[in-house]
Amino acid sequence: MSMRRVAHTLLIILIVVRASPVTAEDNTANATGGCIVLVQGNGNRVDVSQGCGSPIDQSQRNPFKRVSLFIHFFDDDYDQHVALRIAKYIGPYFAFVQLRAVATVPNDYQIRYFHQYDRAPAKRLRDILNGTRNPKLFSVEDFTTYQPPPRPGLLEIWIPDISSQ
């Protein structure tokens, strides 16, 4: 088994272990959080908001309440499953989450931001996803020179093609 597949398996285990059962408090978070939309390779859009977890302590200020998140993954079932797990784990805290199946992905896990204002939320997201067990799985990438820049308040997660490993 490759190191990337091992790291991916640890990420899924971390998400499963850290996600709590849905409670009345979680339903409040879901109601105030955004919709999670999966855009499949064929262009179909599916709402996958049900069953979201709660990774952020309710007593903490939500740094993502005005942030939209796009999760890009290689267009196959296994990688879609990974993207769905991540979206359901962190999705309720974002204004909007969309999963996008794409044909080309980077070779590592990335969180991209496009405006300096979004750097701190990107680093906080990295810390949440990496946890303490695998602090170097997700990296934060500065895309402030990308042209034309998307609107402020947008982060992207890019998941490598794990199924081919």
Image (spheres, helix red, strand yellow):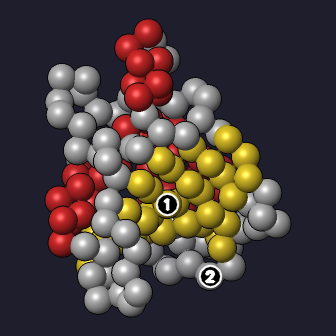
Q: Is residue 139 visible?
A: no
| Element at label 1 | strand
Q: Is residue 140 above or below residue 77?
A: below
Residue visible at 79% across and 57% down in the picture: 44
Identity, as a three-letter code, of the amino acid under mark 1: Phe
Name the disc covering residue 104, or none.
Answer: 2
Disc 2 or 1, which lies upstream in sequence? Answer: 1
Residue visible at 69% across and 58% down in the picture: 39
Q: Please tell me which residue lies in front, 113 or 152.
A: 152
Give the position of the N terminus as an image quadrant: bottom right
User: Taking 51 as reference, is 141 left or right?
Assistant: left
Q: Is residue 40 above or below residue 55?
A: below
Disc 2 to disc 1: CB gap under 8 Å: no
Residue visible at 59% across and 35% down in the picture: 49
Q: Position of residue 77 (x, y in %)?
A: 75, 57
Identity, as a three-letter code, of the amino acid under mark 2: Thr
Q: Position of residue 25 (x, y in %)?
A: 38, 14
Q: Position of residue 104 (x, y in %)?
A: 62, 82
Q: According to the image, label 1 marks what residue?
A: 70
Q: How many other residues sit within 10 Å of disc 2, few (<14), some (14-19) or many (≥20)?
A: few
Residue visible at 44% across and 63% down in the picture: 157
| Element at label 2 | loop
Q: How many other residues sit within 10 Å of disc 1, few (<14), some (14-19) or many (≥20)?
A: many
Q: Please tell me which residue lies in front, 18 or 158.
A: 158
Q: Is residue 140 above or below residue 106?
A: above
Q: Position of residue 130 (x, y in %)?
A: 31, 53
Q: Please tell me which residue lies in front, 116 or 72.
A: 116
Give the position of the C terminus as an image quadrant: bottom right
Name the disc covering residue 47, or none.
Answer: none
User: Taking 153 as reference, is 47 left or right?
Assistant: right
> How far apart, in angstroms, are the residues tagged by discs 2 and 1?
15 Å
